[in-house]
Image (cartoon, rainbow, N blue to C red):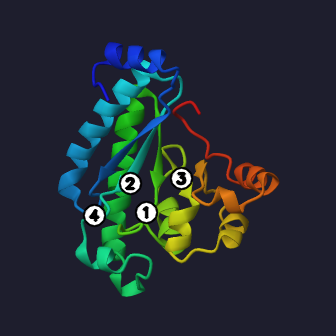
Amino acid sequence: MPTNANVLKEELRRRNLEMLGAFVPVDFSNPDAHATGAEIAVRIAKLLAAVGKAPLIVLADENGKNPIRTQNAGRVRSEQDLSDEQWALFAAGVEHVARSVCEATGLWCVFHHHCSGFVETPAEIEKLLALTGPELVGLCFDTGHYALGEGRLSRAFANTPAASGIFTSKITNRISPGRLAKMNGIISHRSSACGL
């Protein structure tokens, strides 16, 4: 993808495409990576803001960075989780990056949970949402990764009223259109000071 806004805008126009968002992985478990992560996210957000109507920055852990979590993806145990102190640093990093993006561009961030990272299981998703402000960070809910992280979709939609942002489904071929519309309605969006 071009990194010059004018060139990117023209390429998108020629293909009749709209830029909806960009994926920005950051090693949130490492506080030394937060500033660099914010710089990268802001640089990408500025490009998206210049070419898109209402794009999102999709934040994620730098999945695969931790060998124990990677080797146990889809079956992590509680002893492989972050400590309370590590969770506080992780969440502070997510909020720092999201706040930097919002202040620089007005764009909103959502967090994408994923296998091989520290936000994989339903409990970890809930922990991150509890530790971050909804005005800064929403949830990019991914049904495939949720199921791999041992989540039950029926429980997710019943028990996560704050979970929101955007809904992605890698198993939509197994869900009726009416049921998918209902899921999208349940997971609508967290309020945002950044204009969503």
In which image quadrant can residue 160 be found? Answer: bottom right
**Nearer-N-terminus badge (2/1):** 2
Residue drawn at the location 63% of the way across and 74% of the way down? 152
| Kind of element beneath mark 1 | loop
The residue that disc 2 covers is 60
**Nearer-N-terminus badge (4/3):** 4
Identified by mark 2, the residue type is Ala
Marks 4 and 3 sit apart, C-alpha to C-alpha, by: 18 Å
For residue 114, the mark is 1
| Kind of element beneath mark 2 | strand
Where is residue 39? Give x, y as percent. 24, 37
Residue drawn at the location 46% of the way across and 15% of the way down? 14
Q: Is residue 161 visible?
A: no
- Mark nearest the camera among 4 and 1 is 1
**Nearer-N-terminus badge (4/2):** 4
Labels 2 and 1 touching (C-beta < 8 A): yes
For residue 29, the mark is 4
Looking at the image, the residue that sits furthest to the left is 32
144 w.r.t. 72: above or below: above
Identified by mark 4, the residue type is Ser
Q: Nearer the viewer, residue 8 or 124?
A: 8
194 w.r.t. 81: above or below: above
| Kind of element beneath mark 4 | loop
Q: Nearer the viewer, residue 91 or 47?
A: 47
Q: Is residue 76 left or right of residue 123?
A: left
Marks 2 and 3 sit apart, C-alpha to C-alpha, by: 10 Å
Labels 4 and 2 touching (C-beta < 8 A): no
- Mark nearest the camera among 3 and 1 is 1
